[in-house]
Amino acid sequence: MTGRRKNLTDLDPDDRLLTYTQAAGVLNTTPRFPRRLVEERRIRFVKVGRFVRIPESALREFIAAGLVEPITLRGKHARRAA
């Protein structure tokens, strides 16, 4: 999910194009969730005729963008958390 728009030449030819059901399997959700991501333009997708496919790399980018790193508490707050 970069700031610049990607075009067809940016797609890796080995990148698998997934259906909503397959994308939902990767995300461990219902197919409705990846469908909503596409509708809201929150994830890259490819139109193949009337079909919508989601590149596997787009799912990896979406997951990485939502990754939250743990924090390390210091001082007196660290003792409370333990």
Image: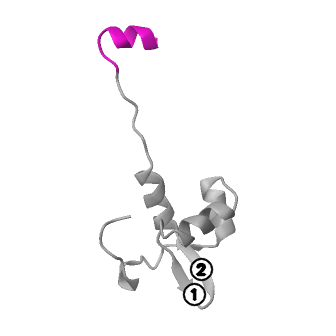
Q: Secondary structure at mark 2?
A: strand
- Dominant secondary structure (helix, strand or loop) of the stretch shown in magenta: helix
Going 29% across and 11% down the picture, which residue do you hit? Answer: 75
Q: Residue furthest front?
A: 40
- Please give left or right for residue 37 compared with residue 10 in the image: right
Q: Secondary structure at mark 1?
A: strand
Q: Nearer the viewer, residue 13 or 30?
A: 30
Decide: is 45 above or below 73: below
Q: Is residue 75 magenta?
A: yes
Q: Residues within 10 Å of mark 1 (few under 14, many from 20)?
A: few
Residue 23 location (% of width, % of height): 61, 64
Residue range (magenta): 73-82
Marks 2/1 in contact by CB < 8 Å: the verdict is yes
Q: Amino acid at mark 1?
A: Val
Which numbered tag is attached to residue 52?
Answer: 2
Q: Is residue 77 magenta?
A: yes
C-alpha span from label 2 to label 1: 6 Å
Residue 13 location (% of width, % of height): 45, 79
Q: Nearer the viewer, residue 64 or 76?
A: 76
Q: Which residue is mark 1?
A: 48
Going 65% across and 69% down the picture, which residue do you hit? Answer: 20
Q: Quadrant of residue 5?
A: bottom left
Going 41% across and 78% down the picture, which residue do you hit? Answer: 11
Residue 31 location (% of width, % of height): 69, 64
Q: Amino acid at mark 2?
A: Val
- Please give left or right for residue 45 compared with residue 8 in the image: right
Query: The N terminus is located in which quarter?
Result: bottom left
